[in-house]
Each structure stands twice: as C-alpha cells, then as structure tokens.
Image: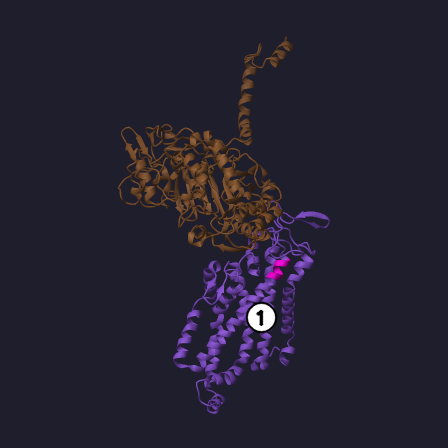
Chain colours: A purple, B brown
Amino acid sequence: MRALAHNKVALAAGASFAVIVVLCLLAPVYAKDIAHTGPTDNHITDTVKVDGQTVDVVSPTGVPIGPTWKGRFLLGADSNGRDVAVRLLYGGRNSLEIGAIATLITMALAVALGTLAGYARGLTDGLLSRFFDLVWAYPAVLLGVALGVALAVGGLDLGIVTLHSGSLLLPALIIGVVFFPYVAKPLRAHALSLREREFIDAARIATPPGPLAPVKIVLTEVLPNLLSSIVVFVPLMFASSILLEAGLSYLGAGVQAPNPSWGTMIADGIRMIPGAVHLVLAPGLALVLCVLSVNVFAEGVRDALDPRAAIRPLR
Amino acid sequence: MSNHVLRDIHNDARTPVREGESNVNRVLRLFVCLSLLPAVLVGLSACGSSTSGGTITVLMGTAPDSLDPGIGATTQSMEATWIAYTGLVTYAHSNGEAGTKLIPGAAESLPTVSSDGKTYTFKLRPGLVYSDGTLVRASDFAHAIERTIKLNWGNKGMLTEHIVGGEAFDKGKASSISGIKTDDATGTIKITLTVPYGPFLNVLAFPAAALLPSSTPMSAQPNNPPAGIGPYEITNVISNRSFELKRNPNWPAHSIPGIPSGHADIDVRIVSNNQSEAEQVLSGSADVFDYNDTIPPTLISKVESQASERYAKEPTVSGEFFFLNVKSKPFSSPLVRQAVNWALDRRALDRLDSGMLQPACFFLPTGMPGHPTAPCPYGDPGAAPNLAKAKELVKQSGLAGTTVSVWGQARSPHKEFVDYYTGVLNAIGLKATEKIVASEQYYATIGNLSTNAQTGWASFSQDFPNPSDFYQLLDAHSILPKENHNLSQVEDPHIQSEIASLSPVPSSQLDSVVGRWQSLDEYTAKQAYLAEFGYDEAPKFVSQRIDFGALVFHPVYGDDWSTLALK
C-alpha cells in the first residue's frame, strides 16, 4: 500500500473515480433540488429561460436545447426534453451499479470455479476448463448481445429466480457470466501452481483427513495466496464491465428504456449529432473519464502488488 | 396622318397590317423578331417550364423489398413499379384527392359490373405491347394474378379471399383460378367475386395485379424484373444498392391517356443515411429525397431556409397511434382508454417526429373519405392535454397502479414516441415499463397473440383510398393467432355490422356512404379503441435542377417519378 501511496497518477485517478461515484450517488438530490425534474420526465413542449429569453426545450422541428449552464438543463435536453445532466447522473448510477454487481458475479464464479479446477485437477479440471473455453470462445460483446437481446423482452424466469426485462440485474448477470472465464483461467493456472508448493503439501499432512479437508486447505492456504491476483482483477473487471454495459445498452441489449445509462444516452443522441452534439459528448466523456480513472487506478494497484514492479525503471 | 396611325396601332392591337408600312420595315421587324426568339425561349425555360431528357438521381433510404411486381409490397417498391406495371385500372397521376380517381389502364374503359356486384368485365385496349415488344393478351392477366398468388405477395389475401377459386388455387387444389375467364380473341377479361367487394378495383390497381407476359416465370425476378406496360422499365438492378428506370421505348406508340410518358431516365440509389441523403439533395449532388425517409431534425431548418422553393411538407393518408388491447387490463376499461386519449400531448409527439405530424385523434386520416368533420371528443389535438381529467378517469376505473408493458420499435422516432407515452401512462397513475424490440421483428412480435401485447406504438398507411382498408385493423376477423392486424383486439358488434354493410360499396360510390363512415369513425374515437395521435406528413424535396412545380405528389404512391423533369 505504501507503493500505491507514492503513485500520484494512480491516486489522482482513484480520486477522480471517487468523485464520479459521489456525484452519481447524489443524483436524486441534484434532480430534486437543482434540476427540479426526474430522469424520465419529458418536457417536450416546455420552455426555459436562457439569458432572459424564453426558449423551447425542444424546437418545433425536434431539435433539443443545448447546455444552459444553469440549474435546469445544465447540459441541455434530449429529444424527449429530458434533462441530460440528470440522466447523466442517474445513468452513471446504473452503469456503476451494473459494473459493481457484474464484477461481483464474475469474481465469485471465477474464484470458485478457477480454484476448484486448479486444485482438484483431473476430470474436474478437464470439465471445468472446457467449460471456460466454451464461454471464452465466444467474443464477449457478441455473447452479451445475444443473451441481452434474448432476455431483453421476456426477462429471465428460472423458477426460483425471476428477473423482469427492465431489471438492472439482468445486464449485470449477463456481463458477469460473459466475463468470468477471463478471470477463472488465470486463477486456475495460479491455483494449479500453488497446489504443488511445499506449504500446501505441509497443510495436507497437517489437516486431519475427511471430506472437507480439501475445502479447508483451499480456504486457509490457497485463497489467501490468490488474493493479490484477485485484488488486481477487481478494478480491471469493473472497468471492463462498465464498458461492456455501455456497449450492450447502446445496442439495446443492456439497460432498457426509459431507464438511462451512458450507453443508451449515446445511442439516443447519435442521430442528433450534427445539431445537438452534447447528447453524445456528455455521456461519452463521462464514460471515458470513469473507465480511464478505474483502469489507471487498477494499474497502480497491480504495480503496488507486483513485486517485479520495483525493478521497473519508470516509477 | 402618322399620328393617327400610331394612335390606331396603340388602340387596336388586333390590326394585322399597318397602313403605310414599307416592305423594308416588315423585313427589319421580322429579322428583329427572329433574333429575339432564342432569348425568349431561354427566358420561358427559366420561368419554370421543364425539359425532356437527361437522368435524374433519386435517393432512397430503404431499399424496396422487391422490384418484382408480384412480390413488392412496400411503398418504396410501389413507387417504382406503379409506373412500370400498369394494371387494368390505375390511378390518375394527380395531386391530392384527384389522384385517388381510378382511370382505365390496360383496359379500354372502367369495367361493367353485374347488378349483383360480383362480376367485373373488362376489355383490353387493342394493340398494347409490353416494354419488350410482346403483344399484350387477355390471358396474360390470369397468368399475372396466379403468379402474384404463387409468389406470396404480402396482400394476396385481397385477391384469394374475393375472387372465386382464388383460395383453391392458393392451396394447390386447382391449377387455375376459376373466377377469371379471358378471351384473347376479343380481349375480354371477366372476373367473378365470391361476394361484392367495394374496393376491388383498387386492388386491381396495385402493380401486383398488372398484366405480365405469359412467358414470365412463376418464380421471383427481383434482379431482372419482367416486362410490363408503362412509361418506364426497371433495369440494372443491384440488390440493396441501385436500380434504374429507363423510358420504355415502346411506350410512345402505345401510350395510355392519363398516364404521363415521363421526361427523364431515373437512377435510384440506396443511401441508408438520411443525413447524407438530405445533404446530397440540398447541395445538388442528387436530385430527389425519397418521401418515405425522414429529414434529420437538425437539418430541417437548413432545408427550410436554403431550399424553401423546392421543399414542402405533403400530407399522407397514414396514421400513428397507440393500440390499446381491450382484452387486457387496464385497457379493458373504457375509462382508462379514454384517459389515455385525454392525456396525450399530440403537440409533443409532433415535435418528436420533427414537426412532420399533423396532430389528430380520429382513426381515419384527413384525405381518406369518411374522415370525421366533428371536433375531437378529447379536446383540440393541437392544444395542451387534460391530464387532470385523465388521472380522474383512471382513478374512477379502479385500475390505478396496474402494471403495463409498452411495446415499441427501436427505430427513431418510434422509440421516442414510446418513451414519451410510457411517461404519460405513469403520470396518469399506471405503472408502465417499456419493451423495445428490433424494428425487423416488431410487428411479428406484437402481432403474435401469445405475446399478449397490452399497448404500444403502431402506424398504418393506406393501401388504397377506401376507409375499409383502415377498418380491417378494427375488424374482428383480423384477430389472428399470428400476424394479428387487430392489435387492440376489438370485437365490437356495431363496428362489425357497419363494416359488413359498407365494405361492398364500390370505391366509385363512396360519396354516398361518407356520412356513415364518418359516424363510425366518431363512434370509434369515443370508444377509444386506440389512441390516434397524428397523421404523417412527408417531405417533397428536390434539387435545384428539378421542376418542383411539375412533380406530382400522389396520394397513394407519393412522389410520382413519371412527372419528374429537369428544368
């Protein structure tokens, strides 16, 4: 952690990400007390005062107002007269929420299955590894789109678990499943090498035999040694999940309208680029800033936890 | 004397030869007149008269589904095929209501109809030839209709359900259609219907019912469309990229009165980006912006200011609405359906459609016989809605808080319509969420009864100028397990009896029943079986090279390319 504290770029990126998170969490406050509108409230035929003049929020030919730099429509409106700043913050909340849940799912699946495959070896490893390969073989975006489109209309009903088509858990689940082999495979390799180490042999001898003995060894000996890898993967997968969520939402397979996300906002604004560039610029910049800050921070964490980083000339 | 003559000349312009005028003066005057003639002609052409010849480039955002008349069912397809494939009857090439008039096409005159309204007898024009020079024969008609049915034309039900033997032929139980009798020697074509069907002549006016040479294969020919009767022939088809309409070399000698001969060859290119399409026409690098496409909102002001003399919004006979499934809560309650109609701000929906919507609440659009003249029962569609009343009605219904899935298409502005509509439903006390489906699968999804779509966006354009065409969407017979057209699932005895009584009235006699159609449409609006919100307007937009005034915007087929001419 001392190494991380000395990496000013990583710290700045971490701080920048923290600011984004705080702003997004404050979305309801901004919407209620400053913009005085919700993320899905239409104001198509409303007017707004800009520099003393009354201006249509959406012109008769359908072009929305640009940034007013005031409380109402700070970053302008979209075609439905919805406040872009409000939607940006709520969209950020959705993107971050999905990113966090998806990362949780990815890591949970990857840690459980990767460690099991690596430690158990043999048939279990063979079956699990082929399963990883099967999911890995599909490009993540294509698989995400296929699952997203299939579940976008009807939702997911597994009997005990029912997710409605508009639920944010649906894209989170899809992203989590799509990404887990990307983490599970390296964790399996790491676990495979760990199980051959002397301290694991010692633990096997020291642990009383029984059906739960391997579980105890994994929990007490293997997992703590995988922790540094897991910690490095978490922010990287978080950034990737946010990016994939934006991509899926852009293609209509992620967050469902009228719920905002940065991806859906970009998709909605594409056709208006020539006259209302703010519609894609605002969510696009937010997405870049968020993903960049998480990635740079993740790099810093990796460098701090990687012993080889010390010998790198540029520090 | 000279003063007198001068006064005479000024007072009587009709004086052909002036007194005392010398031969030299006459020659001089003739010379001056002749030398001024070219200048006058140039001046006249600059004043708006059009010229023949040249090539005009038309841009289309969406490719026709097929350029084979036996398959093509989209407006993009029929825009091209109706000037290359003339049926026994066709429409007058005129703007507005005049364009809905049926005129004889390949037939000598409009048919004689039997007293029971079931038998139509036509006589072919003598000596007609196809664009490939083949002589037109009466038996070609039977071949063309059979081919259209075999190729599964999208509206083939209009033929199979009404012509005797049509269904048997369609199902393979007969080798020909028993209700069509032709005689090549006399050029007589006799069609017998199962029951009187008012719009039957409109059906025969479709390019899909046009005559084709009997040698035309019974398979689709989208890239090599068959020969037809018309001022143009379709050639050089490159699927989803381009095609050409060349003037038919055999047309001048065999032209049909009322059908323009065409001024220029037409080169059609598919440009899927509407922005690029509009900019090319604005700059003059292409000539015609297809009326089916939407000028991007960000460009409309530019087009209006820079090309006002070559841009106009033309009304079309088509409507945009939200269907309300009466068999599903909460729309089973008339109060909730009426609430939706009270709550819609149709001005807002117009803005979402870039100002190309005429706010309205009646199902039958303006321009369609039977469009009501009564005021809208939900207030002025061009004014603010009454949300308070809508909320009150929902409260009265006892269905406040009911969950509603709103179906919409991913395509813009339809998705924006649904975004807005969902907000309205939530505002009046329902719990609405959206289900957005890819455009290609939209109607198949909501038209499947197992989907049980509660409400959502839909639109409809006339197939022909007869209100029965629109009312098939509210006809109980249109409720089908798949490809359901009656999305609101209306089964209203009054509507059924009126459809049964009004549908047999021939289109030519619609004037006699317009009042009844109006009453029916007012009744439909009061029952709020759907929430109509506007009638589409289409852009008529051309380059500076085109004679804008001469271009006819046809009420059925849009831009009439046979009237396109260079200035």
- Point out the image quarter for the C terminus of chain A: bottom right
Quarter of the image for residue A159 reads bottom left
Residue at the image position 51 percent from the left and 64 percent from the top = A171
Quadrant that contains the N terminus of chain A: bottom right
- Name the residue tied to disc 1: A295
From this viewpoint, is residue B510 visible?
yes
Residue B282 painted magenta: no
Helix, strand or loop at label 1? It is: helix
| Left or right: where A194 falls relative to B303 | left
Where are the magenta residues, as a range?
Answer: A85-90
Other residues around mark 1 within 10 Å, as few (<14) / some (14–19) / many (≥20)? many
Q: Amino acid at mark 1?
A: Asn
| In this rendering, position of residue B74 left or right of residue A29 | left
Looking at the image, which is closer to me, B485 or B290?
B485
Residue A197: image location, x then y, percent:
48, 87
Q: Position of residue A275 (x, y in %)?
A: 60, 50
Q: Is residue B230 above or below residue B445?
A: above
B223 sits left or right of A84 in the view:
left
Residue A20 found in image quarter: bottom right
Residue B27: horizontal and vertical position, in percent? 54, 17
Image point (64%, 54%), residue name: A76
Using the image as rendered, state which of residue B142 and residue B363 is in the foreground: B363
As drawn, the residue found furthest toward the right would be A52
Q: Residue at x 60, y 49 (%)?
A: B391
Magenta span has A87? yes
Subunit bearing disc 1:
A
Corner quadrant of residue A290: bottom right
